[in-house]
Image (cartoon, rainbow, N blue to C red):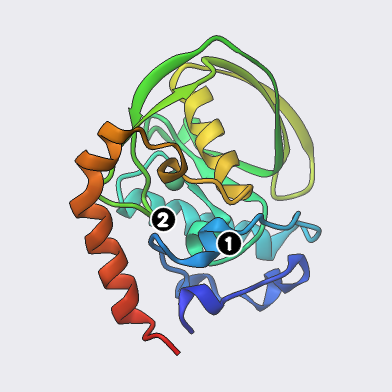
Amino acid sequence: MSPGSAVSGPRGMTAINPRKLQIVRFPDPILKRPAKPVEEFGAALAAFAKRMFELMQEAKGVGLAGPQVGQSVRIFVCNPTGEASDAMVCVNPTLTDLSGAEVHEEGCLSIPEVSVQMRRATRVMLQAFDVEGRAFEREGIDLVARIWQHETDHLDGKLITDHMSTADEIANRRALKKLRDAHRKRKPAR
Ligand code: ZN
């Protein structure tokens, strides 16, 4: 199944074979679609999150969201340091109390070789659920706050390419064209 056609509702979680998941690349339309809340917690969701961690680590990333593996559901995994103790799964996350602002270069595992100067809050509060459905709240600062904002954007169908300045557009033109051409080859126009 091509990544873009893997539309899965919250009840579809048990039907997903985690081994078949792959990172979806720009401009796959699933990346632009707001994701649906997760309603089913437990073993299937845990297996899904575990596979997301594997894919994120293989790609040497610090965060990965559901739509990026072809599943339009509100979950992301992240690990800012690579230390096992810093790994985190966030289901149905919301961010509040955003404060501070910093512009920094940002990349995305779904948009390889592209980087965009992104203004982000430097301090946020995150409310989310773990894979068992237990609610938790955490404060994030600097890089962690930036990752949470980037991944939450993915769940709302927002990408770093939506925020490019003219300079970003020029710098990334070649890489974006390469991605668009590759996408066209994967999915011939009907
Ligand atoms: Zn991303």
Q: Residue furthest top?
A: 100
The residue carrying mark 2 is 54
Three-letter amino acid code of the residue under disc 2: Glu
Element under disc 1: helix
Three-letter amino acid code of the residue under disc 1: Phe
Q: Quadrant of the C terminus?
A: bottom left
The residue carrying mark 1 is 48
Residue 127 location, quadrant: top right
Q: Is residue 69 rendered to the left or right of residue 173?
A: right
Name the residue located 28 percent from the left edge and 51 percent from the top edge: 112
Q: Is residue 169 rendered to the left or right of residue 16?
A: left
Q: Residue 20's x, y, as percent?
A: 46, 76
Q: Is residue 84 visible?
A: yes
Give the Cα separation between the discs numbered 1 and 2.
Answer: 10 Å
Q: Say whether disc 1 or disc 2 marks the residue closer to the N-terminus.
A: 1
Q: Residue 185's x, y, as percent?
A: 29, 80
Label 2, residues with CA under 10 Å away: few <14, some 14-19, many ≥20 = few
Q: Is residue 113 visible?
A: no
Label 1, residues with CA under 10 Å away: few <14, some 14-19, many ≥20 = many
Depth check, front residue: 47 or 148 = 148
Q: Is mark 1 within 8 Å of ligand 1?
A: no
